[in-house]
Amino acid sequence: MLPYATLDEAAAALGRNLTVAETLWFNYSAKKSDYYLYCHNILLLFLIFSVVPLPLVFTSLWRSGGFDKYKIQPKVKLSPSETFKCYKDVMFMFFFVVGPLQLVSYPSVKMIGIRTSLPLPSGWEVFLQLLVYFMVEDFTNYWIHRFLHGKWGYEKIHKVHHEYTAPIGFAAPYAHWAEVLILGIPSFLGPAMVPGHMITFWLWIALRQIEAIETHSGYDFPWTPTKYIPFYGGADYHDYHHYVGGQSQSNFASVFTYCDFIYGTDKGYRFQKKLLWKLKKGVENGVDQNGGSYYVPTQDLKSD
């Protein structure tokens, strides 16, 4: 809750007039508690999980608009009931794990210094903080993901997420409850290291989940804006990880590709891309597995 009763008081405290964005923030948040504002995350996540995957889910179900050529595994098609089951399972986890976790985690957010006060951060401040959050989350998620592909971690926890070998957007948050809790740690580390404004925190939560939905979409569109982000993995990169499944020791990164490159865990993917290039050039003959771009002979999976 802001410590100002009026806009004039806020302007006097800042020593200047409020910007348009700050005026809007004041009008919305002045009489709302910080806890109430923090709990907006619950509604935000619900909307993202429910709405963002819909366009490509409908595209996949109806095979409309000639988008099949962009589907990474085009012969894999979930029925409407299978798709809805995935969404129901995600919502069950949301209401009984994610939502309650958000409700009880406010003290930790307050402790690290996430603020709701004026002034609002500048665009550059928001950008740089988000960059730190993505980098920190990507590095820590990489190592946790590698642990989850060990024998115990995969069999006890991570194999739930890999039930979808050809993922869809709804499957991005589909996971064992323990994995949901564990992977909350990397998402929290960045804001804990570089605390910012609540708006920045909202943006971080939203962008990270939207990114996860995109990488699980099952489609690799050439016009996707994220293709212009350096070292960005994307749907094709992560889809390969799901395609290989429990055998995969490749493509662990959640957002960027630098960790996989540095630690040599992208070799299987790079081998597959080279093989695919040769097949397209007519040097070798092969058959599609799942009708998509991931024909990798069984003996070559060991190169992962």
Image (cartoon, helix red, strand yellow):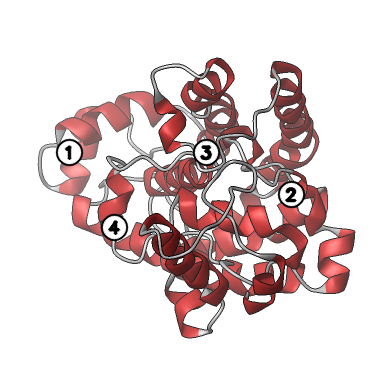
- Identify the residue at the far left of this view: 16
Q: Secondary structure at mark 3?
A: loop
> Mark 4 or mark 1: which is in front?
4
Q: Is residue 188 left or right of residue 129?
A: right
Dot 1 amino acid type = Ala
Pointer 1 residue: 11
Pointer 2 residue: 161
Q: Quadrant of residue 301?
A: bottom right
Pointer 4 residue: 229
Q: Secondary structure at mark 2?
A: helix
Residue appearing at x 36%, y 45% in the figure: 117
Pointer 3 residue: 217
Which sits earlier in the primary sequence, circle 2 or circle 1?
A: 1
Residue 112, given in percent of the width and then of the height, sits at 53, 63
Screen quadrant of the C terminus: bottom right
Q: Secondary structure at mark 1?
A: helix
Q: Is residue 9 left or right of residue 86?
A: left
